[in-house]
Amino acid sequence: MPSPSSLELVSFDLCPYVQRSVITLLEKGMDFKITYIDLANRPDWFMKISPFGKVPVLRVGDEVIFESAVINEYIDEISPPALHPADPLQRAINRAWIEFGSGLLVTQYEMMTARDKPAFDAKCGEIAGKLAQIEARLPAAGAFFNGEKFSLVEAAIAPLFMRLNILEQHLPGVQFITSPRLAKWRDAMLSRPSVQQSVIGNFSEKLLAYLRHGNNYIASLLQS
């Protein structure tokens, strides 16, 4: 097996899927290198190693792994202690909710790029409904999805909550997290050093600048 010290994550600095893998790498305390690319001008070498032309891509020596959930599973397997439950059924349940989180990130992107208020409101409602679904699965005790232990579910969902938190702070009258239970989960994730350090230093400013310059409804809210 290639040495973990040969890990290189190919990234775009605003991508939530890349952030998932950075969180996992930081949780594990692993040595790795990040190479940032411009997705609007993908280099030829990147297109040769990324079958879908997407980030993240993890280079492990001469091999390449793509898709953030798969990358995170690999990282978890080569570096104990595990962030997945030991029980096979609970592992499968965690994987299912990680996939659910992937869909939520798509909905969040559609909300951020909605062209008008009706489309924006519809996506906000969709996010609220999906958050209610995952809230119903949260344990009665413990800060995290599996109780007291941070897991790959948190690594997968934290980028969503980070972006929702930034938007709540800058969009007047918009609030995504109204449930104390969800707020507790969000705060537990966002206070984690691995989550805080998983983005570039000026992430909030760069995300807001990206949204301000887009042809979307949020741009009008940010400029009002």
Image (spheres, rainbow, N blue to C red):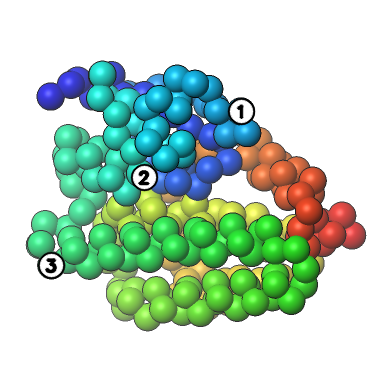
Figure quadrant of the N terminus: top left
Most extreme residue toward the right, as rendered? 224
Judging depth in this view, the residue of 104 and 171 nearest the camera is 104
The amino acid type, in three-letter code, at marker 3 is: Leu
Q: What is the quadrant of residue 206 in the picture? A: top right
Residue visible at 39% across and 74% down in the picture: 134
Mark positioned earlier in the residue sequence (1 or 3):
1
Percent position (x, y) of residue 86?
A: 11, 57
Is 89 rendered above or below residue 41? Answer: below
Q: How far is mark 3 from mark 2, CA to CA?
A: 21 Å
Judging depth in this view, the residue of 97 and 138 nearest the camera is 97
- Depth check, mark 3 against mark 2: the one in front is 2
Residue 203 appearing in the image: yes
The residue indicated by pointer 1 is: 41
Left or right, 111 with respect to 106, comes to right
Q: Disc 1 vs disc 3: Cβ atoms closer than 8 Å?
A: no
Q: Residues within 10 Å of mark 3 (few under 14, many from 20)?
A: few
Q: How far is mark 1 from mark 3, CA to CA?
A: 42 Å
The amino acid type, in three-letter code, at marker 1 is: Asn
- Depth check, mark 1 against mark 3: the one in front is 1
Left or right, 13 with respect to 21, comes to right
Is 99 rendered above or below residue 45? Answer: below
The residue indicated by pointer 2 is: 68
Residue visible at 45% across and 54% down in the picture: 158
Figure quadrant of the C terminus: bottom right
Q: How far is mark 2 from mark 1, CA to CA?
A: 21 Å
Residue 89 has which mark?
A: 3
